[in-house]
Image (cartoon, rainbow, N blue to C red):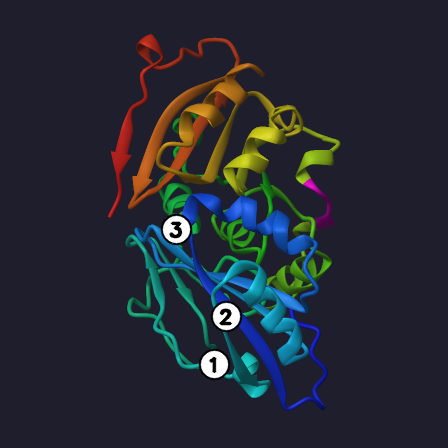
Amino acid sequence: MGANVAASRTKTWCWRRWILSDRRDFWVERLEAAPANSWALLERPGRARVLLEVYVESRGAAAALGRQWGGRIRAMEVREWFETRPTPPTAIGRKLEIIHEATVGGKNPECPRLLIPHGLAFGSGEHATTYLLLRALTHHDHRRQTGVRGTTVLDLGTGSGVLALAGRLFGAGKVVATDFDPEAIRTARENEALNFSRPLIRWRCADVRRLRARARFDLVLANLFSGILAEGAPQIARSVRPGGQLWLSGILDGQQREVIAAYRGHGLQLIRAVRRGRWIMLMLRAGGPGDQETVGGAMKTTQTK
Protein backbone atom coordinates (compact mmCIF):
# COMPACT_ATOMS: atom_id res chain seq x y z
CA MET A 1 0.00 0.00 0.00
CA GLY A 2 1.34 3.44 -0.89
CA ALA A 3 0.41 6.74 0.77
CA ASN A 4 0.90 10.34 -0.34
CA VAL A 5 -1.11 12.07 2.35
CA ALA A 6 0.49 15.26 3.64
CA ALA A 7 1.47 15.24 7.29
CA SER A 8 -0.47 18.46 7.87
CA ARG A 9 -3.79 16.78 7.11
CA THR A 10 -5.73 15.39 10.06
CA LYS A 11 -8.34 13.35 8.19
CA THR A 12 -8.78 11.38 5.03
CA TRP A 13 -11.66 9.27 3.76
CA CYS A 14 -11.78 5.53 3.25
CA TRP A 15 -14.11 3.61 0.96
CA ARG A 16 -14.20 -0.13 1.60
CA ARG A 17 -15.94 -3.28 0.43
CA TRP A 18 -15.39 -7.04 0.49
CA ILE A 19 -14.36 -8.73 -2.75
CA LEU A 20 -13.63 -12.33 -3.75
CA SER A 21 -9.95 -13.30 -3.61
CA ASP A 22 -9.92 -14.54 -7.18
CA ARG A 23 -11.25 -11.16 -8.42
CA ARG A 24 -8.26 -9.18 -7.17
CA ASP A 25 -6.78 -8.64 -10.64
CA PHE A 26 -10.11 -7.28 -11.88
CA TRP A 27 -10.29 -4.75 -9.03
CA VAL A 28 -6.65 -3.72 -9.42
CA GLU A 29 -7.39 -2.76 -13.03
CA ARG A 30 -10.42 -0.76 -11.89
CA LEU A 31 -8.44 1.09 -9.24
CA GLU A 32 -5.79 2.20 -11.70
CA ALA A 33 -8.42 4.52 -13.20
CA ALA A 34 -9.96 5.59 -9.88
CA PRO A 35 -9.22 9.02 -8.29
CA ALA A 36 -7.54 7.41 -5.28
CA ASN A 37 -4.56 8.54 -3.21
CA SER A 38 -3.81 4.91 -2.40
CA TRP A 39 -5.49 1.59 -1.79
CA ALA A 40 -4.93 -1.67 0.07
CA LEU A 41 -6.07 -5.30 -0.07
CA LEU A 42 -6.37 -6.81 3.41
CA GLU A 43 -6.68 -10.58 3.57
CA ARG A 44 -6.19 -13.59 5.80
CA PRO A 45 -4.86 -16.97 4.60
CA GLY A 46 -7.61 -19.42 3.78
CA ARG A 47 -10.36 -16.80 3.51
CA ALA A 48 -12.38 -16.55 0.30
CA ARG A 49 -12.92 -12.79 0.63
CA VAL A 50 -10.53 -9.82 0.74
CA LEU A 51 -11.23 -6.39 2.24
CA LEU A 52 -10.54 -3.67 -0.33
CA GLU A 53 -9.87 -0.17 1.04
CA VAL A 54 -9.43 2.97 -1.08
CA TYR A 55 -8.23 6.25 0.48
CA VAL A 56 -9.30 9.60 -0.97
CA GLU A 57 -9.08 13.25 0.06
CA SER A 58 -12.77 14.12 0.41
CA ARG A 59 -16.07 12.66 1.53
CA GLY A 60 -17.50 13.45 -1.90
CA ALA A 61 -14.88 11.31 -3.66
CA ALA A 62 -15.52 8.43 -1.26
CA ALA A 63 -19.28 8.76 -1.75
CA ALA A 64 -18.80 8.67 -5.53
CA LEU A 65 -17.01 5.33 -5.21
CA GLY A 66 -19.86 4.08 -3.03
CA ARG A 67 -22.48 5.09 -5.57
CA GLN A 68 -20.52 3.35 -8.33
CA TRP A 69 -19.51 0.14 -6.56
CA GLY A 70 -21.45 -0.10 -3.29
CA GLY A 71 -19.54 -0.67 -0.07
CA ARG A 72 -19.15 1.75 2.84
CA ILE A 73 -17.22 4.93 3.62
CA ARG A 74 -15.72 6.29 6.81
CA ALA A 75 -13.51 9.14 8.00
CA MET A 76 -9.98 8.20 9.08
CA GLU A 77 -7.50 10.07 11.20
CA VAL A 78 -4.21 10.30 9.34
CA ARG A 79 -2.41 9.02 12.43
CA GLU A 80 -4.19 5.67 11.88
CA TRP A 81 -2.01 5.21 8.78
CA PHE A 82 1.16 5.31 10.82
CA GLU A 83 0.19 3.64 14.09
CA THR A 84 1.68 0.22 14.63
CA ARG A 85 1.23 -2.39 17.32
CA PRO A 86 3.89 -4.82 18.53
CA THR A 87 3.79 -7.92 16.36
CA PRO A 88 5.17 -11.28 17.46
CA PRO A 89 7.86 -12.89 15.26
CA THR A 90 6.75 -14.97 12.28
CA ALA A 91 8.22 -18.47 12.41
CA ILE A 92 9.00 -20.05 9.04
CA GLY A 93 9.11 -23.65 10.18
CA ARG A 94 12.06 -24.12 12.54
CA LYS A 95 14.74 -22.63 10.33
CA LEU A 96 13.89 -18.93 10.02
CA GLU A 97 12.18 -16.21 12.05
CA ILE A 98 10.94 -12.88 10.73
CA ILE A 99 10.85 -10.21 13.43
CA HIS A 100 8.96 -6.97 12.80
CA GLU A 101 10.34 -4.68 15.52
CA ALA A 102 13.98 -4.40 16.48
CA THR A 103 13.00 -4.45 20.16
CA VAL A 104 11.09 -7.75 19.89
CA GLY A 105 13.36 -10.78 20.16
CA GLY A 106 12.77 -14.12 18.47
CA LYS A 107 11.53 -17.23 20.23
CA ASN A 108 14.65 -19.25 19.38
CA PRO A 109 17.99 -17.40 19.85
CA GLU A 110 19.78 -19.95 17.64
CA CYS A 111 17.37 -19.55 14.70
CA PRO A 112 18.45 -17.38 11.74
CA ARG A 113 16.27 -14.26 11.59
CA LEU A 114 15.47 -11.24 9.49
CA LEU A 115 14.11 -7.87 10.63
CA ILE A 116 11.27 -6.84 8.29
CA PRO A 117 9.25 -3.95 9.75
CA HIS A 118 5.61 -3.73 8.76
CA GLY A 119 5.44 -1.01 6.16
CA LEU A 120 4.06 0.06 2.81
CA ALA A 121 5.65 -2.76 0.78
CA PHE A 122 4.13 -6.26 0.65
CA GLY A 123 5.91 -9.26 2.12
CA SER A 124 6.49 -9.60 5.86
CA GLY A 125 6.24 -13.40 5.94
CA GLU A 126 2.77 -13.92 7.42
CA HIS A 127 0.81 -14.20 4.19
CA ALA A 128 0.57 -17.70 2.74
CA THR A 129 2.04 -16.71 -0.62
CA THR A 130 5.23 -15.36 0.98
CA TYR A 131 5.36 -18.07 3.66
CA LEU A 132 5.34 -20.85 1.05
CA LEU A 133 8.39 -19.43 -0.74
CA LEU A 134 10.28 -18.70 2.48
CA ARG A 135 9.64 -22.21 3.79
CA ALA A 136 10.80 -23.71 0.50
CA LEU A 137 14.00 -21.62 0.71
CA THR A 138 14.74 -23.05 4.16
CA HIS A 139 14.39 -26.60 2.79
CA HIS A 140 15.90 -26.14 -0.66
CA ASP A 141 18.49 -28.75 -1.64
CA HIS A 142 20.06 -27.37 -4.82
CA ARG A 143 21.63 -30.27 -6.75
CA ARG A 144 21.90 -32.18 -3.46
CA GLN A 145 24.06 -29.39 -2.01
CA THR A 146 23.27 -27.36 1.11
CA GLY A 147 20.43 -24.91 0.47
CA VAL A 148 20.93 -21.93 -1.83
CA ARG A 149 24.54 -21.35 -0.79
CA GLY A 150 26.64 -20.26 -3.75
CA THR A 151 23.71 -20.10 -6.18
CA THR A 152 22.32 -17.16 -8.16
CA VAL A 153 18.82 -15.97 -7.19
CA LEU A 154 16.36 -13.63 -8.93
CA ASP A 155 13.37 -12.31 -6.96
CA LEU A 156 10.59 -10.88 -9.15
CA GLY A 157 8.04 -8.60 -7.47
CA THR A 158 10.23 -8.26 -4.40
CA GLY A 159 7.98 -5.93 -2.35
CA SER A 160 9.66 -5.60 1.06
CA GLY A 161 12.62 -7.63 -0.23
CA VAL A 162 12.09 -10.45 2.26
CA LEU A 163 12.68 -13.27 -0.26
CA ALA A 164 15.82 -11.69 -1.67
CA LEU A 165 17.07 -11.06 1.86
CA ALA A 166 16.39 -14.68 2.83
CA GLY A 167 18.36 -15.79 -0.23
CA ARG A 168 21.28 -13.65 0.91
CA LEU A 169 20.93 -14.85 4.52
CA PHE A 170 21.18 -18.48 3.40
CA GLY A 171 24.33 -17.83 1.36
CA ALA A 172 23.31 -17.15 -2.25
CA GLY A 173 26.32 -15.97 -4.22
CA LYS A 174 24.38 -13.41 -6.26
CA VAL A 175 20.92 -11.94 -5.65
CA VAL A 176 18.98 -9.63 -7.98
CA ALA A 177 15.52 -8.33 -7.04
CA THR A 178 13.01 -6.34 -9.08
CA ASP A 179 9.71 -4.54 -8.50
CA PHE A 180 7.67 -2.17 -10.67
CA ASP A 181 7.13 0.17 -7.68
CA PRO A 182 10.04 2.54 -6.87
CA GLU A 183 8.75 2.85 -3.28
CA ALA A 184 9.05 -0.92 -2.84
CA ILE A 185 12.63 -0.85 -4.12
CA ARG A 186 13.47 1.96 -1.69
CA THR A 187 11.91 0.02 1.21
CA ALA A 188 13.67 -3.22 0.24
CA ARG A 189 17.04 -1.45 0.08
CA GLU A 190 16.40 -0.01 3.56
CA ASN A 191 15.53 -3.49 4.84
CA GLU A 192 18.83 -4.83 3.53
CA ALA A 193 20.64 -2.10 5.50
CA LEU A 194 18.71 -3.13 8.64
CA ASN A 195 19.91 -6.73 8.32
CA PHE A 196 23.40 -6.56 6.81
CA SER A 197 26.40 -4.32 7.31
CA ARG A 198 27.02 -3.80 3.59
CA PRO A 199 24.88 -3.90 0.45
CA LEU A 200 25.09 -6.93 -1.83
CA ILE A 201 21.68 -7.35 -3.51
CA ARG A 202 21.12 -5.60 -6.83
CA TRP A 203 17.73 -3.85 -6.60
CA ARG A 204 16.10 -2.94 -9.93
CA CYS A 205 12.85 -1.13 -10.75
CA ALA A 206 11.25 -3.14 -13.57
CA ASP A 207 7.89 -4.50 -14.74
CA VAL A 208 8.10 -8.29 -14.95
CA ARG A 209 5.99 -8.27 -18.13
CA ARG A 210 8.68 -6.14 -19.83
CA LEU A 211 11.64 -7.85 -18.22
CA ARG A 212 14.77 -8.16 -20.31
CA ALA A 213 16.80 -10.95 -18.78
CA ARG A 214 20.44 -9.84 -18.70
CA ALA A 215 21.49 -13.15 -17.13
CA ARG A 216 20.02 -16.52 -16.26
CA PHE A 217 19.67 -17.67 -12.67
CA ASP A 218 19.83 -20.94 -10.74
CA LEU A 219 16.65 -20.03 -8.82
CA VAL A 220 13.93 -17.56 -9.81
CA LEU A 221 11.20 -16.57 -7.33
CA ALA A 222 7.99 -14.82 -8.37
CA ASN A 223 5.23 -13.94 -5.90
CA LEU A 224 2.68 -12.23 -8.17
CA PHE A 225 -0.97 -12.39 -9.22
CA SER A 226 -1.65 -15.45 -11.37
CA GLY A 227 -2.71 -13.28 -14.31
CA ILE A 228 0.64 -11.48 -14.28
CA LEU A 229 2.49 -14.81 -13.93
CA ALA A 230 0.72 -16.17 -17.01
CA GLU A 231 1.13 -12.96 -19.04
CA GLY A 232 4.80 -12.65 -18.14
CA ALA A 233 5.65 -16.31 -18.77
CA PRO A 234 7.88 -15.67 -21.84
CA GLN A 235 10.01 -13.11 -20.00
CA ILE A 236 10.14 -15.01 -16.70
CA ALA A 237 10.98 -18.34 -18.34
CA ARG A 238 13.97 -16.79 -20.14
CA SER A 239 15.48 -15.76 -16.80
CA VAL A 240 15.93 -19.40 -15.62
CA ARG A 241 19.13 -21.14 -16.65
CA PRO A 242 18.90 -24.69 -18.11
CA GLY A 243 18.44 -27.05 -15.18
CA GLY A 244 17.53 -24.16 -12.88
CA GLN A 245 14.31 -23.84 -10.91
CA LEU A 246 11.39 -21.40 -10.97
CA TRP A 247 9.07 -21.06 -7.97
CA LEU A 248 5.75 -19.30 -8.54
CA SER A 249 3.43 -18.12 -5.77
CA GLY A 250 0.30 -15.95 -5.58
CA ILE A 251 -1.83 -18.65 -7.24
CA LEU A 252 -5.26 -19.56 -5.93
CA ASP A 253 -6.71 -23.05 -6.05
CA GLY A 254 -8.19 -23.46 -9.52
CA GLN A 255 -5.69 -21.14 -11.25
CA GLN A 256 -2.69 -23.46 -11.26
CA ARG A 257 -3.43 -25.36 -14.46
CA GLU A 258 -3.52 -22.17 -16.53
CA VAL A 259 -0.20 -21.06 -15.06
CA ILE A 260 1.42 -24.48 -15.55
CA ALA A 261 0.31 -24.51 -19.19
CA ALA A 262 1.81 -21.06 -19.77
CA TYR A 263 5.25 -22.20 -18.58
CA ARG A 264 5.17 -25.67 -20.08
CA GLY A 265 5.00 -23.91 -23.45
CA HIS A 266 8.37 -22.35 -22.66
CA GLY A 267 10.16 -25.55 -21.71
CA LEU A 268 9.61 -25.60 -17.95
CA GLN A 269 8.60 -28.83 -16.26
CA LEU A 270 6.48 -29.16 -13.14
CA ILE A 271 8.25 -30.63 -10.09
CA ARG A 272 5.77 -30.08 -7.28
CA ALA A 273 2.87 -27.97 -6.08
CA VAL A 274 2.75 -26.96 -2.41
CA ARG A 275 -0.48 -25.76 -0.81
CA ARG A 276 -1.26 -23.59 2.21
CA GLY A 277 -4.98 -22.98 2.61
CA ARG A 278 -6.33 -21.87 -0.79
CA TRP A 279 -2.91 -20.71 -2.01
CA ILE A 280 -0.55 -22.79 -4.12
CA MET A 281 3.14 -22.50 -4.92
CA LEU A 282 4.41 -24.17 -8.10
CA MET A 283 7.97 -25.46 -8.38
CA LEU A 284 9.21 -25.89 -11.96
CA ARG A 285 12.51 -26.77 -13.60
CA ALA A 286 13.93 -25.44 -16.84
CA GLY A 287 14.71 -28.16 -19.36
CA GLY A 288 18.18 -29.63 -19.02
CA PRO A 289 20.01 -32.95 -19.27
CA GLY A 290 18.40 -35.60 -17.10
CA ASP A 291 15.29 -33.57 -16.30
CA GLN A 292 12.06 -35.50 -16.28
CA GLU A 293 8.55 -34.12 -15.81
CA THR A 294 6.14 -35.53 -13.27
CA VAL A 295 4.84 -38.84 -14.64
CA GLY A 296 1.81 -38.37 -16.90
CA GLY A 297 1.83 -34.61 -16.29
CA ALA A 298 0.04 -35.21 -12.97
CA MET A 299 0.59 -32.67 -10.24
CA LYS A 300 2.05 -33.77 -6.92
CA THR A 301 0.61 -31.47 -4.26
CA THR A 302 2.01 -31.15 -0.76
CA GLN A 303 0.08 -29.49 2.07
CA THR A 304 2.27 -27.40 4.36
CA LYS A 305 1.37 -26.28 7.88
Q: Amino acid at mark 3?
A: Tyr
Query: What residue is shown with label 3?
Result: 131
Side of 156 relative to 42 (left or right)? right
Q: Nearer the viewer, mark 1 or mark 3?
A: 1
Which of the two labelled residues, at mark 1 and mark 3, occupies the earlier sequence position?
1
Image vertical order of residue 241 relative to residue 42, above or below? above
Q: Nearer the viewer, residue 38 or 33?
A: 33
Mark 3, other Cα within 10 Å: few <14 / some 14–19 / many ≥20: many
x%, y% of residue 56?
65, 73
Q: State the SS at label 1.
A: loop
- 2 or 3: tag closer to the N-terminus: 2
The stretch in magenta equals 203-207
At 30% across and 51% down in the image, what residue appears? 46
Q: Residue tagged by mark 1?
A: 84
Question: What residue appears at the point 56 percent right and 29 percent down from the top-left corner?
Answer: 230
Left or right: residue 134 versus residue 123 is left
Residue at x 29% of width, y 46% of height:
277
Tell me the element at label 2: loop
The residue carrying mark 2 is: 118
The amino acid at mark 2 is His
